[in-house]
Image (tube, grey):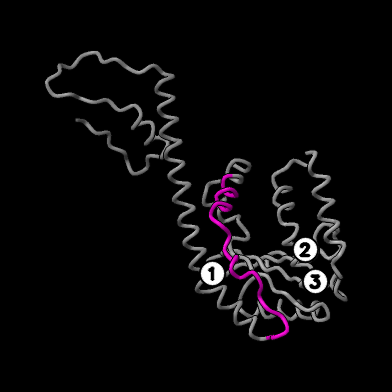
Amino acid sequence: MSVDRLDDDDTPAAALDAYASRETDVPGVPDGPEPRAEPQDRAACHADLRADAEAEYRTYAIDRGCERVCETEQTIVTPAMRSIEAQDPDRYLVGLEHRLKGRDRIEEKVDFDMKKWGVTAEQAFANVKDAIRYTLQYPDDKYSQGVRTDIERIKAEGFELVEFRNSWTREEYKGINSRWRVPENAQLFEIQFHTQASFEAKEETHKAYERLRVLPDDHEEVHDLRACQRHVCARIPVPPDAPDVSVP
C-alpha cells in the first residue's frame, strides 16, 4: 500500500486533503481506471475529517488548560490568598469550595468564544477570566478600608491587577469585582469583595443572573429577572464610603 508522505511544511488542511483523497493499491489487482468519489462526496469526507480533528483539538486544549488552572490554583494562588486572609481576622474567605469554575461552564465559555470571535480553543480558554475565583467578606464598618488594604496585599504577592469594577451604585448587583494575572504564566483569576449582605444577595440572585446571561435583551423574561435582582439588592446596606473605593 502506498502512503502519502507529508513534508514538514504541510499544513493541517493539506494533511486532511491528502488523507481524504489518498488512493490504495491492492495486490493482485491490475492497474486500471478506478472509480472515484464524486466531488461532493470527497468534500463531505474532508469536512467530516476536519470536524473530527477540530473536536479532538478542542478537547485537548481544554484538558491542558484545566490541568494548568488546577496546578496554578494549588501551588500559587490559593496559598497566597490564605496568607492574605491570615493577616486580618476581621474578614475571611467565603465559598472557597467553589474556587474552581466547573469544567462544563468552561467548555460552554470556550465554545461561545470560538463561535462568536473565530478564535482557537486555546485562545478561548485564555479568555476565561474566572476559572479561579475567590470572595473576601468584610464587616460593613470595616469594608472600605479593608478592601483598600487587601488590594495592596494582593499586589504585594506579585499579582497584577487587570480589571477593577465597583458596583455599589448599581441597582442589580452590589459589591466589587476584580481580575488579576499570575505573572509566572499569565493565568487570570477573580477576587470579589463583599459584605455578608451583598454576598447573600449574590447567592440569592444567582439563578436570575445565570438565566439573564443566556437570554437576548428583548426576551420576555428579562424584565422580571432584572426586577427580581433589583428587589433583592435594594435590601443591602451600603457600607460607608464603599462607592468611592477605587484603585490608583
Q: Nearer the viewer, mark 2 or mark 1?
A: 2
Was residue 105 drawn as part of the magenta stretch in this picture? yes
The residue drawn where x is 82% and y is 53% is: 228
Q: Which residue is mark 1?
A: 73
Check disc 2: other Cα within 10 Å, few if <14, some if 14-19, many if 20+: many
Is the residue under label 1 in contact with that under label 2 (CB below 8 Å)?
no
Was residue 237 drawn as part of the magenta stretch in this picture? no
Considering the image in quadrants, where does the N terminus appear?
top left
The residue drawn where x is 43% and y is 25% is: 44
Element type at mark 2: helix
Residue 201, numbered circle: 2
Q: Earlier in the sequence, mark 2 or mark 1?
A: 1
Across and down, in percent, residue 215 comes to 72, 42
Q: Nearer the viewer, residue 211 or 129?
A: 211
Q: Earlier in the sequence, mark 3 or mark 1?
A: 1
Across and down, in percent, residue 41 comes to 41, 20
Q: Which residue is mark 3?
A: 246
In the figure, 51 relative to 152: above or below?
Answer: above
Element type at mark 3: loop
Q: Give the residues in magenta.
A: 88-111
Is the residue under label 1 in contact with that under label 3 (CB below 8 Å)?
no
Across and down, in percent, residue 217 comes to 78, 42
